[in-house]
Amino acid sequence: MNNLYLKSFIRCKRKAWLDYRGHKSHKIWSPHQSIEIINRYKNFYKLSKGDLYAGTKACKKGSSGVIGLKAKSKVIKNLKAEIKPQLLKKVSGHSKWGDYKYIPVVYKLGHRTTKEHLFDLAFCSIVLESYQKSKVDKGLVVSNYSNQINIEKIDLNLRLRKKVLNTFLNLNEYLKRSIPDITEDRKKCTLCSWQKFCDTEAKNNGYLTDIDGIGSKTALFLQKKGILNIKELADAREIDLGEKLIQFKEQKFKKASKFINQSKAYLSGIPIRIFESENISYLLSNKDSGFFIFDIESNPDERHDFLYGFLEVNNLFKNIEDDFYYPILNLTKNSKKSNQEIIQKLFSKKYWPVLHYGETEKVAILNLARQLDLDVKEIEILKSRFIDLHLIVRGSWILPIRNYSLKTVANWMGFKWKQKNVNGSKALYWWIQYKSTLNDLFLKKIIKYNRDDCLATLQIAKWLIKKHEKIN
Ligand code: SF4
């Protein structure tokens, strides 16, 4: 048993069980995890000022930073544990190696220091103390914002140690039992390597959290009210369900109708038309003009949009081979040259609407326009050209899917990405690889992926227009 299982256990009991006993063939590679490992290594290297080495040899030598160490010791009762600390940092003190000792360090990607970070540090410190024969009072949480390393000192006090040991005992018990249920908080599943495996089970069992808009709290609430699965939700009467959903106040009947229809669509596989969205009229009135389809690839941690992809579509229903994809790479953040090129591109067809999926694209372009000191009037005109297909889809249709991301919606409408198992995180992973290797192959993969994102957006536009024409 090691600290990695403990970390998984804090996130999701089932994940720890699967990591320990699950069939590895059900696990999928997570680009998010790989990005974390690359970033982690870079920051640890900086923190150790280049004196970063691996294993016990590095501890004996007194390296400033040590990675890849495995240490074992008895932690509680007769239970032994192993640790694989992300990093050990040399500090002053005395240990079995000499006039220095090590403290554990963890890396965090976001801004929040979580229970996972604290427990990881505390657990590593318990094993490390007996391994290096020296007390460990502090641990460090390291992060990086805008190329600045931030260090947070954590006091590894008795209370925290007691809590972590209790959790460790709990973990050992859980691992002996049968597989735990899928977590109620399905948001945790987004970045999990067991997601596909758990999704299949959730679908087969009709879990309420598979319905768009139903999180763990609402699912629990519905279960308490006697609605246990999607089938029961689909069969509920709008008026009865609305009366129960008091937490949504004046929205309660609207929510009830949405949940019921979403469940019906999910079970039947048939989409349900709801309203005539205002935005769809704008799309329809412009359907015979040309369009830009626009999609961005970004590194959110560095707030850097590294690729702006445009598809010039002269006629929505003509073969796409006649049209034109135009990628603009923004290799360095805030490059005036690429910013100007992007705005020029948009103004090359002054009256063309700009189709995109989600608000990110519009926000990014308006920021660029402001940075380039565009006239307020010009910015307003530019703003009015954006058509968010995500808003249109959500406002006018209930689709038989779990969420309304570009991937899920376009996949359901029959679009296939040319590269397998791709998503925004994978594109970001390629970008990070490109930055450290400067190998153009990674840029080519990103561009190919972005082109497909633009084509997927086009597919959604075509679907919306065709459906509208069929119905009216
Ligand atoms: S996909 Fe979700 S439920 Fe399954 S192991 Fe991961 S976090 Fe837990």
Image (cartoon, rainbow, N blue to C red):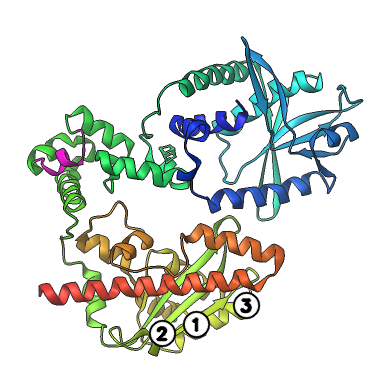
Q: What is the x, y in percent for residue 226? A: 16, 29
Three-letter amino acid code of the residue under disc 3: Lys
How far is disc 3 from disc 1 in space, using C-alphas? 18 Å
Report the mark closest to the observer, 2 or 3. Answer: 2
Between 63 and 309, the one nearer to me in the picture: 63
Q: Is residue 231 magenta?
A: yes
Name the residue located 16 percent from the left edge and 62 percent from the top edge: 275
Name the residue located 27 percent from the left edge and 54 percent from the top edge: 401
Q: What is the x, y in percent for residue 191? A: 48, 47
Name the residue located 21 percent from the left edge and 69 percent from the top edge: 278
Report which residue position mark 3 lands on.
336
- Span highlighted in magenta in the image: 228-236
Q: Count of labels shown? A: 3
Label 2–label 3 contact, CB within 8 A:
no
- Visible in this render: residue 287? yes
Report which residue position mark 2 lands on.
312
Q: Earlier in the sequence, mark 2 or mark 3?
A: 2
- Visible in this render: residue 207? no
Image quarter for ligand 1 equals top left
Image quadrant in which you'd find residue 400: bottom left
Label 1–label 2 contact, CB within 8 A:
yes
Between 73 and 282, the one nearer to me in the picture: 73
- Decide: is 426 above or below 171: below
Report the mark closest to the observer, 3 or 1. Answer: 1
Q: Earlier in the sequence, mark 1 or mark 2?
A: 2
Between 138 and 408, the one nearer to me in the picture: 408
Residue 326 is marked as 1
